Image (tube, grey):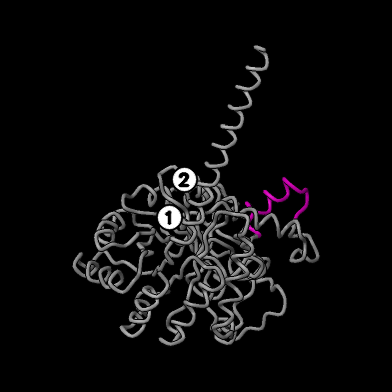
């Protein structure tokens, strides 16, 4: 009799426990559903910074953005943490979320890096970005395989992440130089790129080659066609991934998130600049889906957005579609924003703030009100 009583009590307790767990799971599911529908469609813009400008100028600029529906501002201070610390509270005071924009692997005019020629990437044709730069003079790319160059980048990230009122460190140029330029830009450089050309295939620096040789026992410089060696390609993808993943640790250590500007979708980024961003530890990506660079219409913004969203489906990384404002009419800007949302983006980012004319700002404000 006593045994039956104990079994009865255990059964009741088990039922109560299961019922409680089911209710808890139901509450959590409901919370997730509410959260996913309640999250606002976020609007970002990029802007530059100049220490010589007074605070009043920035206050007016930040107020203009916020008053027209923009939520977040990416500020380029050229990695100057002191300037960022000055501007961040001004932007925050005007209701904006602040993100510290950084040129990461491409470090033009970096006085510290320029003291170390061995830090720079080298092309398959043997040209170093230290003194022979591809495409444009500001392409001064550091090698992600060089430990000292990496540490210099990490120090810059640490400095920005340590600034109060900053939501994220935002990595741009977190890749290799363009193996292939966007098709719409080729005429500007009088180039035809039907294959990986030696002048634009990086990184054959000693640091990169030695790291690869240590891992795989072969030297890409002695291969007949290193451009099609899959291990060599994957090694370089992983070198960038490793920089991002460590940057993620630095940002989170300081209570910040990590975000990045990336090429339109992972497969395309892989092909064009050796950047496979769906494999990274990162909180949010802002793919630069600049349709005019690729001679595409605005509907392509939807395709590229959907591809990126699909590739991130098993990750917590959020995607915000980047739009190139100078080439979009006010009417097309509204359509592009709607297309991005319809294809799964969590918001849109505008490059850049200076290109947001009163007419385009009016569209942004109208879309902000309509989509939230």
Residue 126: percent from left, percent from top = 65, 65
Q: Could you classify mark 2 by the number of other residues whose Cα lies within 10 Å: few (under 14), some (14-19), or many (20 or more)? A: many
Horizontal relation, residue 140 to residue 97: left or right: right
Residue 214 shown in magenta? yes
Other residues around mark 1 within 10 Å, as few (<14) / some (14–19) / many (≥20): many
Q: Residue 63 sits in which quadrant? A: bottom left
Q: Which residue is mark 2?
A: 250
Q: Which secondary structure is most common in the magenta stretch?
A: helix
Q: Which mark is residue 64?
A: none
Residue 364, percent from left and from top: 37, 77
For residue 253, what is the image quadrant? Answer: top left
Helix, strand or loop for disc 2: helix
Q: Position of residue 11 (x, y in %)?
A: 63, 26
**The N terminus - image quarter:** top right
Q: Is residue 112 left or right of residue 246?
A: left
Q: Is residue 84 left or right of residue 296?
A: left
340 shown above or below 4: below
Outermost residue on the top side: it is 2
Q: Is residue 227 visible?
A: yes
**Residue occupying the point 36% across, 65% down:** 71
Disc 1/disc 2 C-alpha distance (Å) = 10 Å
- Please report the residue visible at 47 percent of the width from the left and 62 percent of the height from the top: 37
Nearest the eye: 319 or 245: 319
Please tell me whether residue 46 belongs to the stretch shown in magenta: no
Label 1: state its secondary structure. Answer: strand
The quadrant of the rendering that contains the C terminus is bottom left
The magenta segment is 204-219
Quick check: 67 left or right of 324?
A: left
Residue on which the image places disc 1: 169
In the rendered structure, are the residues bearing label 1 and label 2 in contact, judged by CB atoms less than 8 Å apart? yes
x and y percentages locating residue 33 in the rendered image:
51, 56
């Amino acid at each position: 009799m006593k045994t039956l009583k104990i079994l009865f009590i255990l059964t009741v307790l088990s039922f109560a426990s299961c019922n409680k767990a089911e209710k808890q799971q139901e509450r959590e599911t409901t919370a997730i559903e509410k959260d996913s529908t309640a999250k606002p469609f976020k609007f970002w813009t990029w802007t530059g910074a100049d220490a010589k400008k007074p605070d009043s100028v920035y206050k007016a600029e930040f107020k203009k953005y916020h008053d027209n529906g923009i939520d977040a501002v990416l500020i380029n201070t050229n990695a100057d943490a002191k300037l960022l610390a000055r501007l961040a509270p001004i932007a925050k005071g005007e209701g904006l979320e602040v993100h510290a924009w950084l040129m990461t692997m491409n470090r033009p005019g970096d006085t510290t890096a320029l003291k170390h020629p061995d830090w720079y990437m080298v092309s398959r044709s043997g040209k170093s970005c230290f003194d022979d730069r591809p495409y444009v003079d500001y392409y001064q790319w550091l090698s992600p395989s060089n430990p000292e160059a990496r540490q210099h980048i990490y120090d810059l990230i640490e400095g920005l992440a340590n600034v109060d009122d900053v939501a994220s460190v935002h990595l741009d140029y977190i890749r290799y130089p363009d193996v292939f330029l966007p098709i719409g830009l080729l005429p500007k450089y009088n180039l035809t790129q039907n294959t990986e050309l030696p002048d634009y295939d990086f990184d054959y620096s000693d640091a990169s080659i030695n790291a690869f040789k240590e891992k795989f026992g072969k030297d890409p410089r002695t291969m007949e066609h290193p451009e099609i060696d899959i291990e060599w390609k994957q090694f370089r993808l992983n070198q960038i991934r490793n920089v991002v993943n460590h940057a993620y640790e630095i940002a989170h250590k300081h209570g910040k998130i990590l975000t990045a500007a990336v090429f339109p979708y992972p497969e395309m980024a892989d092909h064009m600049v050796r950047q496979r961003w769906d494999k990274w530890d990162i909180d949010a990506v802002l793919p630069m889906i600049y349709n005019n660079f690729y001679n595409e219409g605005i509907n392509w913004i939807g395709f590229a957005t959907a591809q990126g969203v699909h590739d991130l489906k098993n990750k917590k990384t959020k995607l915000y579609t980047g739009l190139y404002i100078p080439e979009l009419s006010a009417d097309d800007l509204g359509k592009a924003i709607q297309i991005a949302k319809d294809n799964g983006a969590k918001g849109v980012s505008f490059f850049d703030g200076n290109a947001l004319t009163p007419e385009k700002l009016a569209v942004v404000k109208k879309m902000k009100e309509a989509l939230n």
